[in-house]
């Protein structure tokens, strides 16, 4: 319960930053949930998330182009991928990384547990769990990976674009060592 409440409060704090940046009146409810006054229904954002989900399945089948098409081409975008390594910054580095990621997967599928999806003005974010099933090219057995994921989106020229993705496999709490 404490971990869930902490996640809700951290997410609400992130929403407050987005709401403030968009000029919306944000308030944290006693339940720990967030409310943005004056927010419009996010049908465009929800539709874009469905497109992201479909593009991720394509990526997990070795085809990165649909997922790459959803990213901003600006220099301030970042990717902290689930396979570890450096944090990629800028479209050139991220495009190369996504091409490489596509070579790691085939015969993929996933289940997504969307914990939070919010948008306000020209910014939006998602916090979710992703459970992947795939085959590593050249291998016979199926593999699985579970990720905690945060993605940040920005509306650019009227279209939602991915500007940050962080994924890690730290699914269990670990004490300091």
Image (cartoon, rainbow, N blue to C red):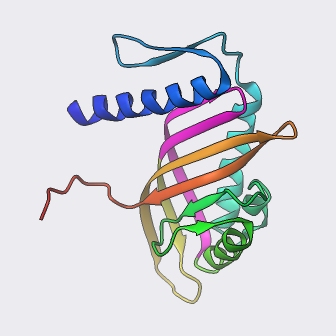
Query: Is the N terminus in the top left, top right, bottom left or bottom right quadrant?
Result: top left
The residue at the point 74 percent across, 25 percent down is 43
Residue 125 in percent (x, y) is at 58, 38
The residue at the point 59 percent across, 75 percent down is 105
Q: Is residue 49 above or below residue 145?
A: above
Query: Is the C terminus in the top left, top right, bottom left or bottom right quadrant?
Result: bottom left
Task: State the residue in front, 127 or 36.
Answer: 36
Q: Is residue 126 magenta?
A: yes
Q: Is residue 37 left or right of residue 85?
A: right
Task: State the residue in front, 69 or 86.
Answer: 86
Main SS type for the magenta part?
A: strand
Total number of numbered labels?
0
Q: In this view, does 30 lie to the left or right of 46?
A: left
Residue 135 in percent (x, y) is at 54, 76
Q: Is residue 42 above or below residue 37?
A: below
User: Quadrant of the rendered structure where residue 59 is?
Assistant: bottom right
Residue farthest along the bottom direction in this orientation:
138
Q: Is residue 117 magenta?
A: yes
Residue stretch in magenta: 105-128
Residue 92 in percent (x, y) is at 74, 72
The residue at the point 58 percent across, 24 percent down is 20
User: Quadrant of the rendered structure where residue 147 is?
Assistant: bottom left
Task: State the residue in front, 161 or 67.
Answer: 161
Q: Is residue 152 above or below residue 35?
A: below
Q: Is residue 122 left or right of residue 143?
A: right
The residue at the point 64 percent across, 79 percent down is 100
Residue farthest along the left direction in this orientation:
177
Residue 162 in percent (x, y) is at 69, 50
């Amino acid at each position: 319960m404490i971990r869930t409440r902490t996640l809700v409060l951290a997410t609400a704090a992130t929403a407050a930053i987005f709401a403030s940046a968009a000029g919306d009146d944000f308030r944290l409810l006693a339940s720990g949930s967030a409310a943005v006054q004056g927010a419009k229904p996010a049908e465009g954002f929800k539709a874009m998330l469905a497109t992201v989900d479909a593009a991720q399945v394509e990526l997990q089948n070795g085809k990165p182009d649909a997922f790459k098409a959803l990213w901003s081409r600006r220099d301030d975008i970042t990717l902290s991928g689930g396979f570890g390594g450096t944090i990629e910054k800028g479209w050139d580095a991220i495009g190369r990384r996504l091409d490489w990621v596509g070579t790691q997967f085939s015969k993929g599928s996933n289940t997504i547990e969307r914990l939070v999806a919010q948008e306000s003005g020209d910014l939006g974010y998602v916090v979710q769990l992703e459970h992947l099933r795939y085959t590593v090219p050249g291998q016979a057995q199926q593999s699985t990976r579970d990720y905690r994921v945060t993605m940040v989106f920005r509306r650019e020229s009227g279209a939602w674009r991915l500007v940050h993705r962080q994924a890690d496999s730290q699914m269990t709490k670990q004490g300091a060592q």
